[in-house]
Amino acid sequence: MNTAEELKEIVRQKYGEIAQADNAQGVDCGCGPTSCCNPDSSTEASYTILMNDEYATVNGYAADADLGLGCGLPTQFAKIEPGDVVVDLGSGAGNDCFVARAETGEMGRVIGLDMTPAMIDRARKNAKSLGYTNVDFVYGDIEDMPLPNDLADVVVSNCVMNLVPDKPKAFAETYRILKPGGHFSISDIVLTGDLPDGLQHDAELYAGCVSGAIQQDDYLQIITDTGFTNVQIQKKKVINLPSELLLKYLKPEESQTYQQAVEGHPARGIFSITVYAEK
């Protein structure tokens, strides 16, 4: 597996490509723009990981800001109140920020943080076109946020923590920027049971949130160890990888063994969870 800095550069490059695409949703790949979207460039085939939730009917939804890169709908569970300060970690083109802005209203404030310059540019253009003056986008790393202590009432994030190599540090930073009594609602990908080596260690799949996933129990333990309380899973859904994708990274017998193991044990596999916790 690549080093932490190499992984960040992979993510930055791939998400930068999506941000600058003329039709970003056309390369939708759930949690990230991996090569699974078009495993064979000589054909028109496109295999989409069905991770993202449907936003179209949500108040504040902006189609131009929806790049289809999430794995949940954390704002739906985030208990955002009018006047709140909300921070979105890994804000992309701004979709979750604009949904949060519909909840917090004109008296609130929404800040999107992203480490991809092209995403920041696209998000700022989207905010300007929508006429929003209380939605800001900041360039920065989730492991070292350029944000003050005790800033946010609510933190949200949609399928981004998997892209952060040092997850304990990322959650420590989340704790730092939350006000006492604040809370987060974060959607992410976790595992129950091990992934085959071919899926677990591929850098491209890391950018797609698959090989970056850790065990659900370990994920929740990091949150608890950080100091958060009232940790609870608000939503959980299974992520089924298409056989075409599995065969790109696994031998046929490995793919069959993995599929049989998941089908035989519904509690095992890859899942999207939305987690809530309080400071």
Image (tube, helix red, strand yellow):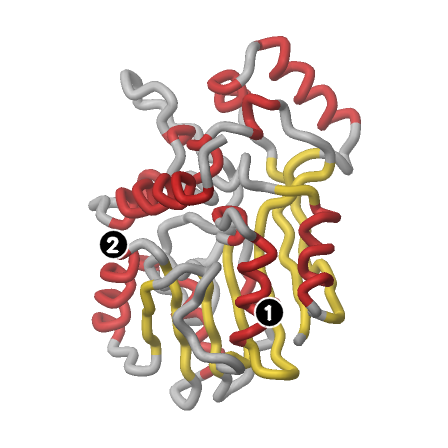
Q: Is residue 30 left or right of residue 186?
A: left
Q: Is residue 148 left or right of residue 258?
A: left
- x, y percentage for residue 144? 45, 63
Q: Is the residue marked by circle 2 packed among few (<14), some (14-19), or many (20+) residues within 10 Å?
A: many
Residue bearing the label numbered 2 = 118
CA separation in Å, label 1 and label 2 = 26 Å
Q: Which one is nearer the viewer's eye here, 140 or 193?
A: 140
- Residue at 53% across / 43% down in the picture? 51
Q: Which one is nearer the viewer's eye here, 176 or 245?
A: 176
SS for dot 1: strand
- x, y percentage for residue 155? 53, 70
Q: Is residue 194 left or right of residue 176?
A: right
Which image quarter is the C terminus in? bottom right
- Up/down of 106 relative to 257, above or below: below
Q: As shown in the figure, which amino acid type bears the numbered disc 2?
A: Ala
Q: As shown in the figure, which amino acid type bears the numbered disc 1?
A: Phe
- Residue at 29% across / 63% down in the picture? 123
- x, y percentage for residue 180? 63, 83
Q: Could you tell which of marks 1 and 2 lies nearer the N-terminus?
A: 2
Q: Quadrant of residue 28?
A: top left
Q: Which one is nearer the viewer's eye here, 144 or 45?
A: 144
SS for dot 2: helix
Is disc 1 in contact with disc 2, using a CB cutoff of under 8 Å?
no
Q: Which mark is residue 184?
A: 1
- x, y percentage for residue 124? 25, 67
- Up/down of 59 relative to 180, above or below: above
